[in-house]
Structure formats: structure tokens, C-alpha cells
Amino acid sequence: MRSTGSTRGTRGTAVLGLVLVLGLAACQGTGENSSGRTVQAAAALPARFGVGRAATPEEVAAWNLDVNAKGEGLPAGSGNAVSGAAVYAAKCASCHGVKGEGGVPPNPKLVGRDPRDFSFADSARAGKTVGNYWPYATTLYDYIRRAMPQNAPGTLTADETYGVIAWILAENEIVTRDQVMDAKSLPAVVMPSRDRFVRDDRKGGPGFK
């Protein structure tokens, strides 16, 4: 038993020693010499690896779709709640409900002004909708154009998108059903919760997270 154990111990020590030697050699190959200069153990890497290609202007344009709170980036086109009702029924209601009441999670409720006192900090059960929580109407265009309908994002035309937005806003009692939404009128919509948010005016620095 002693002889076997001693042999195993010797073999284990030899393997460990070999690992340490190889590891040290690898470190020395890519480490620094006594003068502090990096030792190049391998040939210099190529400037390019030959993977991929430059994006075409058309491909860049397809992703460059952001719309900010001021409405910058909104395209030409228009729609109202009347024209948007048919689009919503055909392409949105299956997930978000016929009246925007929401569907099976994660399909959220879109319509609803309650609570009207913005008591979200006091009640975790208060459901956030476009009508009682969103501060900017322009966010609707930015999000819908990018991500909706979920099974075919990016397929809605500008007119269809404006129409769906007008329908959502009208159902939330924010605009009238005949009010036209376009690149000029949509940024002018004052959402009920516009002034409920505190603007983040931090400039950075050590305490900025």
C-alpha cells in the first residue's frame, strides 16, 4: 500500500510540475521582459480577418429609424382613428385585445386612463398604459415602426402607423377620432403624464451611474 501510494504521489507531482512548466512558458511567451517591453511570442495579427462586409446605404437606412421625443425622424404620411381602427383590428387586436385591453402576457394593455392620479409609486398593481403613463406620443411611432406587429415588424406603412397611433390615442381620450396624426401634429400631442417625470439633468462624474 505504501509503495503504491508513493508511486501515485510521485506521478502526480510530475504531472503538476509539467503543467506549471508549460504554464510558465506560455506566460513568458506573451509577458514582459526585464526592460518592461512586451515580448511578441506570435506574429502580428492581420489588420482584417476577412469576415463580413461593409453595410450598404440601404441596409443602414433600414435600421436608422429612430424618432426622438421632439418628433425628429418622423416620416411623411398621416392617419386618424377612423382609418387606424381597421389596421388595429387586423394587425394588433389579436395580441392587445379588441379594445386595447391587453392579452396574454407579455402583450400589454394599451388603453386605460386609470389611475388618473399617477399613483404608480404607491401601488404596484396600477397597470401602466399609453393613456396613464407614457410621457411622449412620439414614442408610439418609434416603437411600432420597429417592433410591431410582432409577427411581421416593419411591415406597416407610414399611413397605417399614424392611423394606429391615432386610434390608440383616441381610445385613451387624448385626441379626437377625426384628429389627423402626422409628423407635425404627433409631437404636439401633450400626454396626460408629460409633467409627471423628472428630467435627468445629471452631467456625469464619479457619482453618475
Image (cartoon, rainbow, N blue to C red):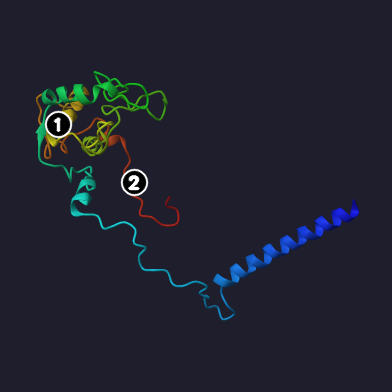
Residue 177 appears in the picture as rendered: no
Whole-percent x and y of residue 204?
Answer: 38, 55
Please name the amino acid that badge 2 sits on: Asp
Residue topped by disc 2: 200
Q: Where on the picture, by quarter, is residue 104?
A: top left
| Residue 69 located left or right of residue 35 | left
Q: What's the residue at 14%, 36% (across, down)?
A: 158
Residue 21 drawn above or below residue 36: above
Marks 1 and 2, Cα distance to the nearest angstrom? Answer: 33 Å
Q: Nearer the viewer, residue 19 or 104?
A: 19
| Residue 102 located left or right of residue 124 | left
Whole-percent x and y of residue 148?
Answer: 25, 33
Residue topped by disc 1: 160
Furthest toward the right, the residue is 2
Residue 165 appears in the picture as rendered: yes
Q: Where on the picture, by quarter, is residue 142?
A: top left
Q: Which mark is residue 135?
A: none
Q: What's the residue at 22%, 51% (across, down)?
A: 60
Q: Where on the picture, by quarter, is residue 155?
A: top left
Along the polypeptide, which appears first: circle 1 or circle 2? 1
